[in-house]
Image (cartoon, rainbow, N blue to C red):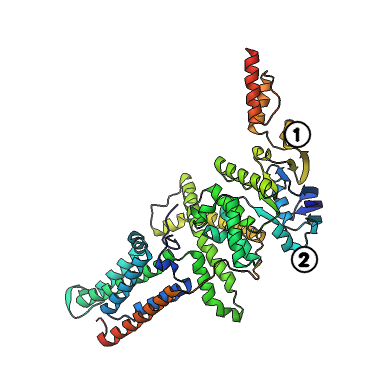
């Protein structure tokens, strides 16, 4: 089976794994806010050290984290290049036409790249340390207030967890169909972008058909197991523990720290 | 009392009748194999028996409860169905979460769900895999998890709708062992729908379907003794039966049998006596 970084739970027992998924989701949001509030390298350094500590406590191997970043490597490099070349500034090292490499540009692009990497790493850490079911349970629980406006929170959570469950299956299926089409002479590797996208249509159509067939069967299997969308109980109940309290204090300290750093040390450029 | 009873059931998917005037019953605790080639209506039978499909005419009873809108969920709790493709019947990524799904649907208390998961996984021999990711299991293991998911509802009848069709020989054997044990030890009534003739040998009774009707019925050995008739319904004998038959046609005096040991003994005897 192909390894997919997104939605791949890394099963070990750790402090971070045991945190309440609701807390982890809220912490992630808080962390992302902190990343955006941080206006200088000191703020980012604080964020990064919190994240590194979280990774250390999660016992997720470093290679897994790197893999998650590798997935967005193109975006990272692209962002860096654009900002180095077009940002402009006072201390110019090199310029040609509208292109201009300056000290400010380099600093700013480093700042953006760190932000981006932190964002990707913290979100993937969430999926590495939280089972899809815990994640959707957490989202369901956090969205409970929406039940008041008759929003089908439970159905949404179930849809999400099934979607996560189907990702590896559909990846396998895509690979299988691709091989089948290759055997019939399809060419996915050459030609321009347009041609390659077009070559993918004979893969997408059977994939879509099979997904519908699977959905139909899954529906029957759920019916057979007495699913009716009505009242049901939950085997896994979410519970806050002292770990979540520790985490919450850490989170609050993080945001306060980053805000203070922004106020007292100002912007990067 | 019959576990499942069909009385004059008709069903069509909109065109021709897929099941016509079907009378079929399964006794409590019985193990029945339903055989038939593609399109014989055997899978429709499974979907009718727990109300996924609705009969156009006739009556279906499960433990004397008539299957209708009012009793749909009572019936579904009694009749579990395991389908063909294990990938298309697991809803959760982790084994125990998936097994819990059915028990959660009928709103059991948490402690009871925990006990049911334990019971179901033990019954299919998958206790160690409780926290595993479903996607990483083998086909046979996935299908055993699917069976556990049904068992967690503690059904009295289990219908396996071609549940071994997508498995390799080892997976098929795993499922056959589990099903046989459930029938003998947990006293669960089993309806095994299959086109693998070998599996039918495990059953107390075999039923052959063709074009929506039951055309043969009896003990598996009796059915397989009528090999010419089976061929007209596009079904072939189990391998052992075929071997015995061709040996006899080749001039050896072996009896028709489906038991590999018996056949081996007879061949040995024949060789000793012959020489």
Q: Is residue A142 left or right of residue A123?
A: right
Residue A35 x, y percent position in the rendering: 34, 77
Disc 1 or 2, which lies upstream in sequence?
2
Please identify the quadrant where the C terminus of chain A is shown.
bottom left
* Dot 1 and dot 2 residues touching (CB under 8 Å): no
Find the distance from the CA under tag 1 to the CA under tag 2: 40 Å
Residue at 55% in and 61% down? B97
Secondary structure of the residue carrying numbered label 1:
helix
State which quadrant residue B117 falls in: bottom right
In the foreground, B41 or B202? B202
When the figure is inspected, residue B195 is found, relative to residue B244, above or below; the finding is below
In the foreground, A246 or A226? A246
Residue A254 x, y percent position in the rendering: 34, 79
Label for residue A226? none
Q: Is residue A253 left or right of residue B232?
A: left
Chain under disc 2: B
Are the residues under marks 1 and 2 on the same chain? yes
The local crowd at label 1, few if under 14, some if 14 to 19, many if 20 or more residues have their Cα within 10 Å, is: few
Residue at 68% in and 40% down? B200
Label for residue B70? 2
Chain under disc 1: B
Label for residue B222? 1
Residue at 62% in and 20% down? B268
Residue B136 x, y percent position in the rendering: 48, 53
The local crowd at label 2, few if under 14, some if 14 to 19, many if 20 or more residues have their Cα within 10 Å, is: few
Residue B155 x, y percent position in the rendering: 69, 56
């Amino acid at each position: 089976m192909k390894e997919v970084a997104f939605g791949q739970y890394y099963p070990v027992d750790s402090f971070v794994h045991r945190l309440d998924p609701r807390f982890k989701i809220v912490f992630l949001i808080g962390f992302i806010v902190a990343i955006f509030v941080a206006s200088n390298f000191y703020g980012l350094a604080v964020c990064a050290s919190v994240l590194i500590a979280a990774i250390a406590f999660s016992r997720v191997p470093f290679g897994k984290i790197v893999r998650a970043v590798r997935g967005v490597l193109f975006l990272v490099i692209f962002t860096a290049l654009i900002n180095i070349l077009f940002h402009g500034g006072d201390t110019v090292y090199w310029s040609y036409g509208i292109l201009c490499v300056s000290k400010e540009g380099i600093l700013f692009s480093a700042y953006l790249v760190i932000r981006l990497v932190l964002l990707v790493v913290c979100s993937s850490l969430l999926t590495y340390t939280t089972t899809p079911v815990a994640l959707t349970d957490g989202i369901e629980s956090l969205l409970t207030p929406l039940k008041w406006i008759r929003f089908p929170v439970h159905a949404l959570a179930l849809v999400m967890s099934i979607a996560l469950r189907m990702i590896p299956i559909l990846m396998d299926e895509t690979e299988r169909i691709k091989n089948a089409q290759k055997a019939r002479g399809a060419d996915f590797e050459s030609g321009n972008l347009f041609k390659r996208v077009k070559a993918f249509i004979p893969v997408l159509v059977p994939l879509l058909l099979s997904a519908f067939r699977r959905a139909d069967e899954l529906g029957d299997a759920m019916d057979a197991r007495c699913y009716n969308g009505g009242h049901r109980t939950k085997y896994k109940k979410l519970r806050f523990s002292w770990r979540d309290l520790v985490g919450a204090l850490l989170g609050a300290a993080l945001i306060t720290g980053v805000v203070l750093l922004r106020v007292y040390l100002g912007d990067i450029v | 009392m019959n576990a499942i009873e069909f009385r004059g059931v008709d069903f069509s998917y909109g065109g021709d009748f897929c099941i016509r005037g079907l009378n079929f019953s399964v006794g409590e605790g019985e193990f029945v194999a339903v055989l038939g080639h593609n399109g014989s209506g055997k899978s429709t039978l499974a979907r009718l028996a727990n109300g996924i499909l609705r009969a156009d005419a006739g009556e279906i009873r499960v433990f004397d409860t008539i299957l209708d809108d009012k009793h749909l969920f009572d019936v579904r709790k009694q009749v579990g169905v395991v389908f063909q493709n294990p990938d298309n019947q697991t809803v959760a990524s982790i084994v125990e979460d998936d097994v819990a799904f059915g028990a959660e649907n009928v709103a059991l208390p948490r402690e009871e769900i925990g006990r049911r998961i334990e019971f179901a996984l033990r019954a299919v021999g998958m206790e160690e895999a409780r926290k595993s990711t479903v996607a990483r299991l083998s086909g046979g293991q996935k299908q055993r998890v699917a069976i556990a998911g049904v068992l967690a509802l503690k059904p009295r009848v289990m219908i396996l709708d071609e549940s071994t069709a997508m498995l390799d020989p080892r997976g098929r054997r795993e499922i056959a062992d589990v099903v046989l044990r459930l029938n003998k030890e947990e006293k669960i009534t089993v309806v095994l729908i299959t086109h693998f003739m070998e599996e039918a040998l495990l059953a107390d009774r075999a039923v052959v379907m063709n074009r929506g009707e039951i055309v043969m019925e009896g003990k598996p050995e009796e059915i397989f003794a009528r090999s010419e008739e089976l061929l007209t319904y596009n079904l072939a004998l189990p391998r052992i039966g075929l071997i015995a038959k061709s040996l006899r046609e080749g001039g050896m005096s072996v009896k028709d049998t489906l038991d590999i040991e018996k056949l081996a003994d007879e061949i040995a005897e024949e060789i000793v006596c012959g020489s």
